[in-house]
Amino acid sequence: MSTVIKGGTVVTADLSYQADVKIVGDVIVEIGPNLSGDQTLDATGCLIMPGGIDPHTHLEMPFMGTYSADDFESGTRAALAGGTTMVVDFCLPNPGQSLLEALQMWDNKTGKASTDYSFHMAITWWDEQVWREMADVVDRGITSFKHFMAYKGALMVNDDEMYSSFSRCAELGALPLVHAENGDVVAAMTAKLLAEGNNGPEGHAYSRPPEVEGEATNRAIMIADMAGVPLYVVHTSCEQAHEAIRRARQKGMRVYGEPLIQHLTLDESEYFNPDWDHAARRVMSPPFRNKQHQDSLWAGLQSGSLSCVATDHCAFTTDQKRNGVGNFSKIPNGTGGLEDRLPVLWTAGVNTGRLTPNEFVAVTSTNIAKILNMYPKKGAVMVGADADLVVWDPKRKKTISAKAQQSVIDYNVFEGFEVTGLPRYVLSRGKVSIVESEVKAEPGHGKFVAREAKNPVNRALSQWKEIVAPRKVERTGIPATGV
Ligand code: URP
Ligand code: ZN
Ligand code: ZN
Ligand code: ZN
C-alpha cells in the first residue's frame, strides 16, 4: 500500500520546495511532482516537514517518591497529536543497579508506544561494573549517557565520577549529557529557605538561581574538555549557561545546548501566583526565568549557539504536586509539553519572525537527529528516510486547554495559549496517526531506534591535551632517592 502526500511544500532544515511525497511501508520512496498512490493525503496550503523529535522526556519515571504520570502510551499519543514522531527517554538505574538490568526494566515500559523511541542511559553511580557495562549499553544502540549534577542524595554524581564517565564516553565514541545545576549549593539554599519558613513553591525558584546553573554548565564543559569529549547540556534555561556554551563553541568545542519550550515562553512570575496549585504545577528544574534569560535563549536559537528545543516532559498531576504542601523541596519536579512543543514554538518563534520555517525544522528535528546519530533515518524528508512526517497547517488555530489534551494530567502549563500552526496529518513510520484533532495512533507501533557511537572526539583547543595524552619528559639525571 502506498500513500502520497499531495500539493504541499516540503520544508527541511535547509530547503523549501513544492513536491509530493510518496511512502511505501515505513519509508519515503519518492519525492517529486505529480505522484500518485493508493491513498492520497491533501497537503494543499500545508508544509511537509520531518516529524518532531523530542530528545528529552521522562515517561513513567520513578522520581521523588512517585512516578511521572504519562507513560509510553499517553506520552507518545500526546507527542503525535502535536506533530512529534519520536521521543528519547531516560533510563535511570538505581544506585548499585546494573545498567543492563535497568535497561530491561525501561524497555518493558514501551510496549504501547505509538512513536519510535530511543533512550539515554543515566550514570547514577560509579564503579568498575558501570565502566564495563557502558560498552554493552553502546552495543545495544544507546550511545548517550546522562549525568545529573543536581538532586543530591538521589541521582547526583560528583566531579570525579563525571570525569571518569566522560572519559569512558570518549573511549566509546558516546555523547555525555548533563543536567547542569550545582546540587551542593541547591541543597544548602533549600535548607536555608526552609529554615527561614520560606516553604512555598516560589522557594523552589529561589533555591536554584541562574548562577547555580551557570557554574555547573561551565564546570561540565571544562570537565568534558579535559576528558576530550563533546557535551550536550539539557534544559539550558539562562544566560549564564548559554554564555558558557557559546564561549566553548567559539573555541571549537562541540557543546550543544537544549532550551525547553517552557523556558522560552513561561517566566518566573508563575511562581508568585497566589494559587499554590498554579505555582506548584510549574515547579521544575531549572525553574522558569525572567524575560532577559528568555531573550538570550531565543537569540541562541536564532544564531545557532543553542541547538535544539525539547520539553523534558515529566508530568505530575496536581495531586502528586500536593506532596510538597508545606515544603517546596517535596514537590515532584517536572512539567509537561509533549503535545504543545511544536505549536507553541511555531507560534512564538515562526509567526513572530524569530525563526524561519527551516530553522524551526532544524531545532525541533534535524539537529537532534544529527547530534544523536539518527540522521537521515530520522529528521529528514529524503528518499529512504523513515516516513515520520508532519503535514503542518500554518493557519490552523486552537486555544490550548487541558480539557482537550492527550496527556493524562489535569492541567496544562500552556492553558489559554492561542496557537496558530498545527498538524493536519502526522505519520509515524508511514502510519497515519493524526488527522487534525482525530487521534489514530496505534499503541505498539513504535519501535526502538538503535543509534551508533560515532560522535567525533572533541578536538577543541584544549589547554588540557597533555592530560589526555601525557608527554613524558626524557631527563638526563635523576637524583638517587633519599639523598
Ligand atoms: O524538573 C525536571 N526537569 N524534572 C525532570 C527531571 C530532570 O531534571 O530533567
Ligand atoms: Zn534535568
Ligand atoms: Zn529531564
Ligand atoms: Zn504499526
Image (cartoon, rainbow, N blue to C red):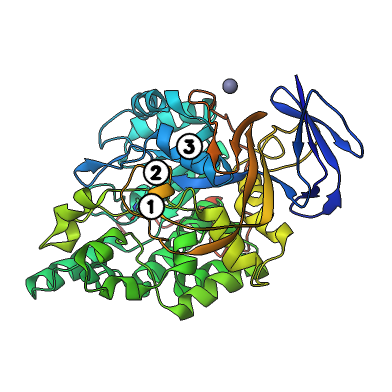
Of mark 3 and mark 2, the one earlier in the sequence is 3
Of mark 2 and mark 1, the one earlier in the sequence is 1
Q: CA distance from mark 2 to mark 1?
A: 8 Å
At a point 44% along the width and 25% down the height, the residue shown is 112
The foreground one among 165 and 67 is: 67
Q: Secondary structure at mark 2?
A: loop
The foreground one among 455 and 49 is: 49
Label 3 packing within 10 angstroms: few (<14), some (14-19), many (20+): many
**Residue 447 x/y as whole percent:** 54, 26
**Residue 153 x/y as whole percent:** 20, 50
At a point 61% along the width and 48% down the height, the residue shown is 368
Give the quadrant of the N terminus: top right
Give the label, 3 or 1, closer to the camera: 1
| Residue located farthest toward the right when viewing the structure as drawn | 33
At a point 70% along the width and 33% down the height, the residue shown is 387
> Is 367 left or right of 98, judged from the image as shown?
right
Q: Which mark is residue 407?
A: 2
* Residue type at tag 1: Ala
The foreground one among 397 and 173 is: 397
Contact between marks 2 and 1 (CB within 8 A): the answer is yes
For residue 184, which quarter of the picture? bottom left
Q: Secondary structure at mark 1?
A: helix
Question: Can you identify the residue that label 1 sits on?
Answer: 402
Give the label, 2 or 1, closer to the camera: 1
Question: Can you identify the residue that label 3 sits on?
Answer: 77
> Is 383 left or right of 377, judged from the image as shown?
right
Contact between marks 3 and 2 (CB within 8 A): the answer is no
Q: Which mark is residue 444?
A: none
At a point 30% along the width and 42% down the height, the residue shown is 68
Label 2 packing within 10 angstroms: few (<14), some (14-19), many (20+): many
